[in-house]
Image (cartoon, grey):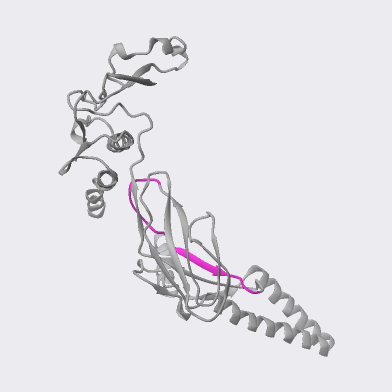
Amino acid sequence: MKLIQALRLRVRRNLFLEKSPEIGEVTLTQRRVFTLPSKAGLVFLFVLIICFLTATNYNLNLGFAMTYLLAGLVVVNTLFTFRNLAYLTLSARSGAPVFAGDPAEFVFKVNNTHALERFAIHVQFQKSQGLEHILDLKAHEETTFKLSYPSSTRGFLACPRIQLQTWFPLGLLRAWSTWLPDAQVLIYPAPEPTPPPLPFIGQSTESGQSTSGQEDYSGVRSYQQGDPLKHLSWKHIARIDLDAGGNLVSKHFTGTTAGALSIDFSHLSPQLDLELRLSRMTSWILEADRLSLPYDFRLGAIYFPSSSGDNHRQACLSALAVYGLQEQAQGASND
């Protein structure tokens, strides 16, 4: 199986030019556009063969004329199908960062540099069954569009290979080409759904489950290990059947009397899963940003002093997104 896969990969690289990511603009030259009969084209070819055999068997001059006319139509259609895709200029740029689990968007630009209109060009990711984008381009027209791709884990998501294809004008032939742009989207860790309160200095616990103040009651949340017993919401617990699997409920307080806000990776228990710790820090960053609270950030050797705003939030989330990935890649290459 490995030998067959390696042989198939070599064929695709040499025949279909499916190599490494391509930087900058790419033009679909003659060498990059391939034309093959579609399903309808194969049926049409079978009909032509039947017509030719019938005309030969019965010596029908009109049969020969119709057969040659339809065959000439196929030849002309081949030229139009090929020209509909050839010599388009493509470029791409990286999309905005997203959180793991959210669709990542890649931005593409297609430029029709020729005095020839293009119709019904289908663009989609090659190994995706998702939605495709259909383009119609006037002469010398340029257009920009986006394609979404699902994200699953944090880090950099490289743009998958793009496939462009067209059946214009008669649907008898399929002209197609592939392109692997050098673009990527940064994927932040997914925020923890029910994180502990914000970790103000002086109230951090060993597990990182801190309280964010004792001034203003803001509601209830699921009980987190380490919550004080006095914060249990007995009024709500009385309505829950704990024997049936219900969870304890804690009161949630907000306020800034607990001191400065510090989001420090070392304050989280090492017994927690790495991805859970990163997700918890992500949730704290988003909550602090929502409340417009300044916070300092520490992740290993990375330290950002106390601040707030979009730039501070993006810098912290970017550090979380790539934390430890280089070491993991080196370990995998050594194995």
What residue span does the magenta drawing correspond to? 152-169
Q: Any magenta on residue 155?
A: yes
Task: State the image quarter where residue 67 is shown.
Answer: bottom right
Query: Is 99 in front, or is 294?
Result: 294
Percent of width and height locating residue 219: 39, 20
Is 67 displayed left or right of 12 in the figure? right
Tell me if residue 222 can be seen: no
Percent of width and height locating residue 280: 30, 34
Q: Measuring 49% from the left and 65% from the top, which residue is drawn there?
A: 163
Percent of width and height locating residue 157: 36, 53
Q: Any magenta on residue 162?
A: yes
Percent of width and height locating residue 230: 30, 11
Task: State the image quarter where residue 234 is shown.
Answer: top left
Q: Measuring 18% from the left and 27% from the top, which residue is drawn there?
A: 201
Is 224 displayed left or right of 46 in the figure? left
Query: Is 56 in front, or is 161?
Result: 161
Tell me if residue 71 can be seen: yes
**On screen, residue 332 above or below 168:** above
Is 41 displayed left or right of 88 in the figure? right
Residue lying furthest left: 301
